[in-house]
Image (spheres, helix red, strand yellow):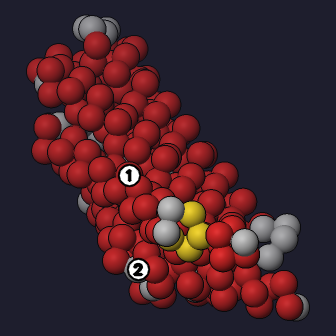
Amino acid sequence: MAAATATTGGRPRAARAFSSGDRTARLIALTGLVSFVLIVVGAFVAPPLWSAPGTHSSGARAAAYAREHQTREIASLFIYTLGMGSFLCFAAGLWSRLRQIEPAPHPLSAAFALGAVGLVVLVLAAFATGGVLTYRAQGAEVAGVLADTTFALLALSGMPTAICLGAYALLVLRYGSLPRWTAWLAMLGADAHVLITASFMSHDSFLSLEGSVRIWVPATFFTWILAASIALWRARGESREAISTARASLSSS
């Protein structure tokens, strides 16, 4: 009777649970990979970011740029939105795993989740103002405000992104479950996104939104998405064993 309850359909319950956990890990990793691919595709569909008028440009220049690249801008915003939606699913799955290895009251995993939600909200808000700018012809004054608001929202999204990445880094460095190199990559991204939050301080410095910071700083975040997704896909069984070990250590402490 005991043997019968321990197995179902010829497979031990532990084996079925382990297999189910591996499938869940694959699904989480896949959503991260889909997010990365969509973001890259969106970047190729969109006009080159370095050619976009910066906050120093006139409203007339912003309006003309939006009219000239209307089709590509709208298409890329749609693709980017799908990518951010996929990232939110990836972050939710990753949070559910990270929360298992952290002792109550789970402050770091909560910070990771709230940071992920915050950055997605601000980025989608930036897409909304960018979409309004591009959807139909705007006057120079309105176009200037919408363009500046888009840049502002993207810059401010750097703070919740830094919180999200920093919390992930601390969790993995302290409790494991994923390779430590992904934590160091996340820490690099967190530091970079703190810098982009300070981009309002000057129009001409290294941190300015008119400079290369608007390209390479987001690239650190996208690289982390790819790295964490690949690491989770390759370390399915190992990460589950690490979670089990962490649970055992937490229950014995």
Who's the residue at 73% across and 81% down the image?
247
Could you tell me residue 149's position as x and y percent? 46, 31
Q: Residue at x 17, y 37 (%)?
A: 46
Q: Secondary structure at mark 2?
A: loop
In percent of width and height, residue 115 lies at 62, 54
**Amino acid on which disc 1 is placed:** Thr
Mark 2 and mark 1 lie on one chain; the one further toward the N terminus is 1
Label number found at residue 162: none
**Percent of width and height locating residue 150:** 42, 33
The residue carrying pointer 2 sits among few (fewer than 14), some (14 to 19) or many (20 or more) residues within 10 Å by Cα, namely: some
The reply to whether residue 242 is visible in this rendering is: yes
Residue 31 circle label? 1
Quarter of the image with the N terminus in it: bottom right
Q: Out of 164 and 142, give the one closest to the viewer.
A: 164
Q: Is residue 40 above or below residue 150?
A: below
User: Nearest the camera: 159 or 75?
Assistant: 75
At x 13%, y 44%, the residue is 44
Q: Position of residue 124 (x, y in %)?
A: 46, 34
Residue 107 found in image quarter: bottom right
Q: Which residue is mark 2?
A: 235
Left or right placement of residue 135 versus residue 41 in this view: right
Q: Is residue 222 left or right of residue 88?
A: left
Q: Could you say which quadrant of the image residue 84 lies in?
A: top left
Discs 2/1, front:
2
* Farthest residue, direction front: 1
Instruction: Point out the image quarter for the C terminus.
Output: bottom right
Looking at the image, residue 108 sits to the left or right of residue 205; the answer is right
